[in-house]
Image (tube, grey):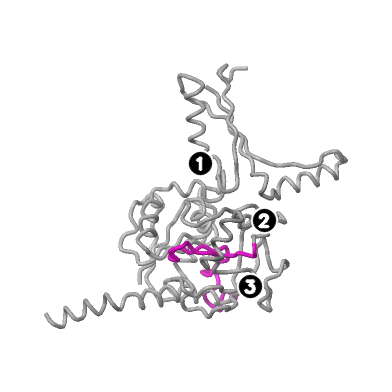
Amino acid sequence: MKFAVVVFPGSNSDHDAHYAVSHPLGEEARFVWHKDTSLGDADAVILPGGFAHGDYLRTGAIARFSPIMADVRRFADAGGPVLGICNGFQVLLEAGLLPGAMLRNDRLHFRCEFVNVRVEQNDTPFTAACRPGQRLLMPIAHGEGNYYADAAVLEQLERNRQVLFRYVNAAGEETRDANPNGSVRNIAGLCNEARNVVGLMPHPERAAELAVGGADGLVMLQSAVHWFTRRAPAAVAVARSSSLSA
Amino acid sequence: MRVRVFVTLKPSVFDPQGTTVAEALHTLGFGSVDGVRQGKYFELDIAASSPDEARQVATDAADKLLANPVIESYRVEVDSAGGSR
């Protein structure tokens, strides 16, 4: 499976994502510069963490107009799996590929620590290998992760089961203290209505092997492979039968 | 033509920075300051033949980039004197 990792000026988790895909996961990763106009033959796209374009104006506000974003949108519209991590999530929000917006953390701290999130839904490309309700310990590193959406959008998110991750405590309970940034309803990550575009503030790629303090994030990348190989059998079967008959 | 664009968080949206500035002002003795909302201010110099045209360009720029309509609203002021005050 081929993962494209988009590199914006100011991305800083691009190499982490590339490494996590190449090594602990064992799949193919390649960088795509933000000024490129094609994702090539990628099977999945990662928008990495960092501070794209210095986060000037608003987080993700300039990055959404980078040339590569037209092809990211095309890929997403065609049902391709897109994962936005931290700053990548903020870019997806600004681009309108996911609903809502980010505000400054409510207690004004830049939060850099491990947090627990609960997996709310496992029918997306990046949660398919998770158990429902599974708790994942992953690091966060952000100053603007205070997710906001108005009441109507929130109602729609809940009705469509688009909230994928919520901040919880070690016991798996959704409490105020477990919420590092004031995010509405403890939302740490969500997907679009078609469920192929996923964004979250925690960094699964920075928790993909035990050597770095945790491997809980690896399951999200494994999910993509799981989703891809389960979705592919029909196409593979057709290809095989035609090659056998030939 | 000089156009000013003021971008502010919508009243319904919590403003952590404004709240913190208000608390700092209270600490400094500005007890009469009941609230602070922090926003952004832009000055655009636009080559336009009329104030209406300049306003339209600034409005388009605000809609597309300067403000995020999910959380922010904006106000546009055209300085038809050319900004040379």
A239 over B32 or under it: above or below: below
Which chain is home to disc 2?
Answer: A
Residue A73: which disc?
none
In the structure shown, which secondary structural element does the residue marked by tag 3 occupy?
strand
Q: Front-most of A179 and A66?
A: A179
Is residue B54 on the magenta stretch?
no
Whether labels 2 and 1 share one chain: no
Name the residue rendered at 35%, 61% in the picture: A78
Residue receiving disc 2: A105
Q: Position of residue A9 (x, y in %)?
A: 47, 51
Residue receiving disc 3: A116
Which chain is home to disc 1?
Answer: B
**Distance (Cα) linking label 2 and label 3:** 17 Å
Q: Position of residue A178 (x, y in %)?
A: 69, 69
Sequence-first tag of 2 and 3: 2
**Distance (Cα) linking label 1 and label 3:** 34 Å
In the structure shown, which secondary structural element does the residue marked by tag 1 occupy?
helix
Which residues, given as a range, are shown in magenta? A185-213
**Distance (Cα) linking label 2 and label 1:** 22 Å
Which chain is home to disc 3?
Answer: A
Image position of B64 (left or right of A237)? right
